[in-house]
Each structure stands twice: as structure tokens, then as C-alpha cells.
Amino acid sequence: MEIIRTVAELQAKLRDARSRGTIGLVPTMGALHAGHLSLIERARKENDTVVVSVFVNPTQFNNPTDLATYPRTEQADAALLENAGVDYAFMPSVEEVYPEPDNRQFDLGPVAEVMEGAMRPGHFNGVAQVVSKLFRFTEPDRAYFGEKDFQQIAVIRRMVELEGFKGLEIVDCPIKREADGLALSSRNVRLSAEQRSVAPAIALVLRSSLIKSREMSLADTKKWVIDTINTFPFMQVEYYEIVDALTMQPIAEWSDSKNPVGCITVFCGDVRLIDNIKYVR
Ligand code: PAF
């Protein structure tokens, strides 16, 4: 595996790689865990060359403390990527990705206005900025994203449409979980031992709500999820929305969508955790 720091070097390497076959890109912000590794494994199976970007993108953080405390584990990340059979680890500096300020405002539309879009103003525009740059630098055939950030995938699809990236397949991959159900996240390392012991309640309650949803109205199911999670120590639900999987718009009745997805964010102490569940109707 080669570690690449500059766009020019990446593009030179990928010119050759492209003549040999397909390129799969896995964009990450590092602090890699088994969730990322599952995306890489899939990319490895489906492509001739695999590029993983490791870049903590400042433009998508609307909270400076979150950016400052975001875990950075470059050496450990490089070792994991090497082991996973990655060809190129793209680990650029902020100046390399943003030689000048990126003032682009993407017209991301309704998919970006709700949930994370409402709670974290500017976040999705920052994601669109960096992912569009990574797509330009890499020109991948496929790009891999985890469904833990369910809304992010819809936003990226919208950005791809706006920017006209033709022939690029966005591949969404299932959430990876700890044995106790907690969705893998780079932020989990910030949980204290006590917080870590209650955090799986998010996934357990969501899973139980699948059964409840067969008998409860959508509004009652939502309320039950929020109230139940809030009974656990440290836990405070920020939002729980049940939305259509394609439009990301909240629905009022189960019959309003063929593919309802419940998307949640919960503060466990000061660590913001996100998760989601697909309600099979
Ligand atoms: O999901 C993430 O880790 C980030 O939002 C991404 C897609 C790598 C862009 O910085």
C-alpha cells in the first residue's frame, strides 16, 4: 500500500490504475473501525484498485469542539488499511484539499433540510464540498458509504446528480454493530465505561420498536422510542424521525411510505450517537 499526500501524486497513480480496471473509493475521516473495514472489504471484492481517503474535513463540522476532539489515529489507520489490502491511502493536509476557501453552496434540496440538516447547519454542504472534491481527484467507478449515516447517502446522491458525475455508482453498505448492538462509530471511543454500557439501548429500543410498530400508530411508535431511550442514564434523544427512505421527508402514517426508516440521534453524555432502523411493512 502507498500513502499519498498530494492530489497530483494520486492522479498520476490512478491514471495507470484506470487503464488496468475499475477504481473503488472509500471516503473516511479516519479513526477506522470494523465498519470502515466492511466497506473496504466490499470495495476490494468489486474493484481492481481500492483507494481509501482519510481526511477530517473541517468544512463539515459546525461545532469547533467536535472538530477539535474528533479522534485522529493516522498510524493505526495506515496499519489497518495495509492489512485490508488497500492500494492507496490518500491522507492529504487541509491545505492540499482546500488550497483556497471553498465557497460553493450546493442546492441540496429537501433531503438536506431535515434531521441532521436542521440540527447541524452547513454540515451537509461541507460533506458535499469534500466528497465532490474527492470524486474529482479520484474519478472512481464506485464509492462506498455506510448506512449509519443514512441521510448522508441521500445527500451525496443529490450532489452526484447536481455535479453530473456520470458512470459513478454510489454503493450503500449495511451498518456494522458491536455484539451488543451498538452501531460502530469513531465517536464510541469517547464514551466512558458507564456510558458505553448503556449506549446499546439505542439499538435495542429501535429493534423492539419494529415489533411495536405492527400494532402502534407511527406517532405512538415515535413517542415510545423517545420516552424509552430517555429513561436510561446519560441518554437524551435529540430527535427521532420516521422518514421515507428516498425523500428523507418525515411521514405521518405508516401508509405514507413503502420504505419507512427511523433515524435517531441521542446524546449519551456529551457524545452524539446516531443510528437508524428500517421498518419492514
Ligand atoms: O461519513 C464520513 O465519514 C464523512 O462525512 C465523509 C463521507 C468521509 C466526508 O468527510
Image: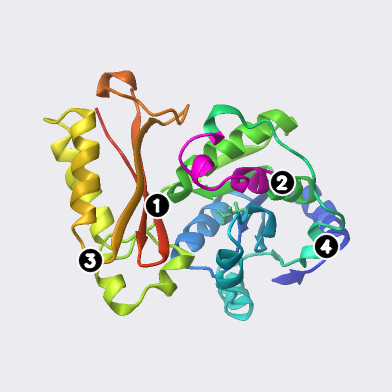
Residue identifier under label 4: 96
Q: Report crowding for label 3: few under 14, some 14 to 19, many 20 or more residues within 10 A (C-alpha).
A: few
Question: Vertical placement of 4 versus 263: above or below?
Answer: below
Q: Earlier in the sequence, mark 1 or mark 3?
A: 1
- Amino acid type of the residue tagged 2 in the rendering: Gln
Q: Is mark 4 in CB contact (under 8 Å) with mark 1? A: no
Inter-mark Cα distance, 1 to 3? 25 Å
Q: Is residue 6 left or right of residue 73?
A: right
| Picture coordinates of residue 145, whole percent (x, y) | 54, 48
117 within the magenta span:
yes
Q: Is mark 2 within 8 Å of ligand 1?
A: no
Residue identifier under label 1: 175
Query: Which label lies toward us, 3 or 2?
Result: 3
Q: Which residues are magenta?
A: 112-128
- Amino acid type of the residue tagged 4 in the rendering: Glu
Q: Describe the element under mark 2 as helix, strand or loop.
A: helix
Inter-mark Cα distance, 2 to 4? 14 Å
Q: How is the image coloured?
A: rainbow
Q: Earlier in the sequence, mark 4 or mark 3?
A: 4
Q: Is residue 80 left or right of residue 34?
A: right
Residue identifier under label 3: 233
Q: Is mark 3 in CB contact (under 8 Å) with mark 2? A: no
